[in-house]
């Protein structure tokens, strides 16, 4: 079942000042700084356009894996991948078809090296850094090195002025919402157990950030 931010926002206390739409000057500055740090950046107007961008970005025959991301659900990518109307090798289909817990966990680790790994991010500093965290690390593990290519999809509401603000957003916006989701989905609290600061991409063309001019994700 697709999960939306609206499903949890009433139960979570968040800092709404760190979840706002940036002005055009801030967005342009953020894009310029991300590009200066080696990230490819695509700015789109809508969730539908984000899905079109993803579809055109990944070549036929590529192996594709994604970490959990409310944003990917909101733009329709998760449903699209599950429905199978594509020419990719869907690693989630293979993984969740494994009955043995140990073998499934091994397959999840191996899937970190997918040709294309997709996910979200918890905060974007206007100075050009990306910040994300997981309880298990199953999403952010692919970002620094393991995956051949990374596609990160984010609403522009995750843009904040500085890296310190990005850490604050992780703690006071993303975590409270994800904690409510985790309690409902898994029956356990979430945790900021494994945290990534993605400061630069040194491999040309490896990591693409798709920024959507909508209020999306945590």
Image: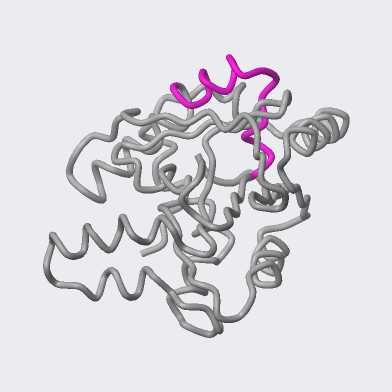
Whole-percent x and y of residue 104?
21, 64
Residue at point 51%, 51% (across, down): 119
Residue positioned most to the front: 203
Residue at point 22%, 57% (across, down): 105
Name above or below for residue 75 compared with residue 193: below
Per the picture, the main secondary structure of the magenta-coloured stretch is helix
Residue at point 45%, 59% (across, down): 66
Which of the pair 215/145 is nearer the observer? 145
Name above or below for residue 52 compared with residue 188: below
| Residue 118 on the magenta span | no
Which of the pair 162/62 is nearer the observer? 62
Whole-percent x and y of residue 120?
53, 47
Residue at point 77%, 52% (across, down): 42
Q: Is residue 126 left or right of residue 3?
A: right
Count numbered badges in the picture: 0
Q: Is residue 10 left or right of residue 149?
A: left
The image's colouring method is one colour
Name above or below for residue 165 compared with residue 197: above
Whole-percent x and y of residue 199?
62, 29
Q: Quadrant of residue 107?
A: bottom left
Q: Is residue 31 left or right of residue 66?
A: right
The N terminus - image quarter: bottom left
| Residue 166 on the magenta span | yes
Whole-percent x and y of residue 171?
44, 22
Which of the pair 170/91 is nearer the observer? 91
Q: Which span is picked out in magenta?
A: 155-171
């Amino acid at each position: 079942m697709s999960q939306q931010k609206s499903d949890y926002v009433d139960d979570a206390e968040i800092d709404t000042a760190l979840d706002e739409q940036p002005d055009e000057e801030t967005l342009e500055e953020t894009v310029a700084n991300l590009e200066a740090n080696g990230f490819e950046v695509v700015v789109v107007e809508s969730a539908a356009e984000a899905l079109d961008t993803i579809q055109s970005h990944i070549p036929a025959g590529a192996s594709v894996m994604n970490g959990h991301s409310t944003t990917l659900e909101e733009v329709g990518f998760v449903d699209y991948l599950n429905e199978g109307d594509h020419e990719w090798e869907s690693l989630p289909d293979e993984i969740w078809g494994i009955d043995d817990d140990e073998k499934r966990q091994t397959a999840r680790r191996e899937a970190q090296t997918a040709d294309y790994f997709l996910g979200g991010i918890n905060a974007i500093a206007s100075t050009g850094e990306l910040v994300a965290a997981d309880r298990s690390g199953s999403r952010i593990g692919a970002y620094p090195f393991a995956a051949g290519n990374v596609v990160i999809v984010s609403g522009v509401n995750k843009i904040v002025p500085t890296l310190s603000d990005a850490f604050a957003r992780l703690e006071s916006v993303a975590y409270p919402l994800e904690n409510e989701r985790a309690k409902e989905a898994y029956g356990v609290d979430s945790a900021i157990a494994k945290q990534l600061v993605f400061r630069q991409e040194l491999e040309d063309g490896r990591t693409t950030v798709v920024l959507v001019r909508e209020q999306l994700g945590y």
